[in-house]
Amino acid sequence: MSNRTAVTEFLLLAFADTQKLQLLHFTLFLGIYLAALLGNGLILTAIACDNRLHTPMYFFLLNLALLDLGYISTTLPKAMANALWNTKAISYQGCAAQVFFLFFLVGAEYSVLTIMAYDRYVAICKPLHYGSLLGSRACAQMAAAAWGSGFLIAVLHTATTFSLPLCQGNAVDQFFCEVPQILKLSCSDAYLREVGAIMFSGFLVFGCFVFIVVSYVQIFRAVLRMSSEQGRHKAFSTCLPHLAIVSLFVITAMFAYMRPPYLSSQALNLVVAVLYSMVPPTLNPLIYSMRNKDLKEALRMLLQY
């Protein structure tokens, strides 16, 4: 029985069998990657350069854009390189790095989305306390806590996953190093340690989800009590983009990890992985800029220079 020290590289799943189709996938993913870089890059630049956007809401949006850039850069460049050079290999260290950064960035992003729900709750339900509850120091501490929680989750899952003995080969049935696919390579019963870690993370995710839901129930109750139609419209314009991003993030992740076994197949796993690893980082800038007048104005002024 071989253990993990015998594995020096993993073989990732190819998108197609022929070189022409591989190049087609490379072109498609390059377009997606450039769109994500451009969208999130513009969000970062607009918030950094426009003093009107130096508020807690846009500070957390800046953090979200940074995380999205890292999130899509963890998996897509390697997948594009493999498609371009018609190879499947990724080193053992590279695979461990992918797992670490995926959990780090996804964990931190979900924490930031939870904080953004709290930000909207305070802004709408407790506007008189907004300055005291979300001052610059409090925002910095919450952002640091979000990034720190992602780091701790990443260390937990990376250490647990790559301490498992592997005795089922080195072919990962996915285009990046996805933990469920790596667990399939582990020896019998050894994977239960990582399953326990995943369940622990699942409880944390569920707790954040409940917090977001309760926050938005309170937000919508407060908005519907507003007498001014303009005030309701402004409140919804700041809340709906965040709610759309949370829904997109949660739905794709839940379908990836919680769908029943009979819905599992190689093709479906590939499609779902593309959805949750590429779609949220690419669409988040578009979702936030569509209904946000201040951000659209900042982007318009930025593009005019």
Image (cartoon, rainbow, N blue to C red):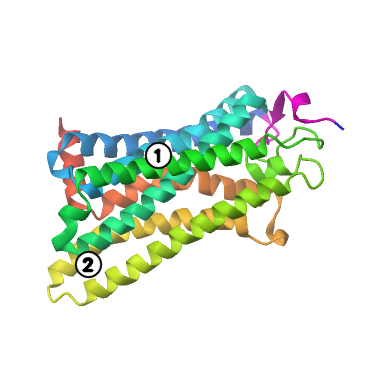
Q: Is residue 63 in sight in this rendering?
A: yes
Give x and y (percent) for residue 228.
12, 73
Is label 2 or label 1 in front? Answer: 2
Q: Nearer the viewer, residue 239 or 130?
A: 130
Helix, strand, or loop for circle 2?
Answer: helix
Residue 60 location, x and y as percent? 29, 46
Amino acid type, mark 2: Cys
Q: Is 269 in front, or is 31?
A: 269
Residues tagged 2 and 1 counted as in contact (Cβ below 8 A)? no
Q: CA distance from mark 2 to mark 1?
A: 28 Å
Q: Is residue 4 left or right of 153 when viewed as pictured?
A: right
Location of residue 133 (image quadrant):
bottom left
Badge 1: how crowded within 10 Å, few (<14), some, or many (20+)?
many
**Looking at the rendering, which quadrant does residue 166 occupy?**
top right
- The residue lying at 48 percent from left, 38 percent from top is 151
**Front residue of this view, candidates 301 and 91:** 91
Q: Earlier in the sequence, mark 2 or mark 1?
A: 1
Q: Which residue is mark 1?
A: 67
| Badge 1 element | helix
Residue 279, relative to residue 12: is it above or below? Answer: below
Quadrant in which residue 224 is drawn: bottom left
Q: Which residue is mark 2?
A: 125
- Asked if residue 176 shows in the view, the reply is no
* Residue 260 drawn in magenta: no
Span shown in magenta: 2-18
Question: In this rendering, would 32 be left or right of 296?
Answer: right
- Give the x, y percent position of residue 46: 22, 37
Residue 232 in percent (x, y) is at 19, 69
When the figure is inspected, residue 44 is found, relative to residue 268, above or below; the finding is above
Residue type pointed to by label 1: Leu
Numbered marks: total: 2
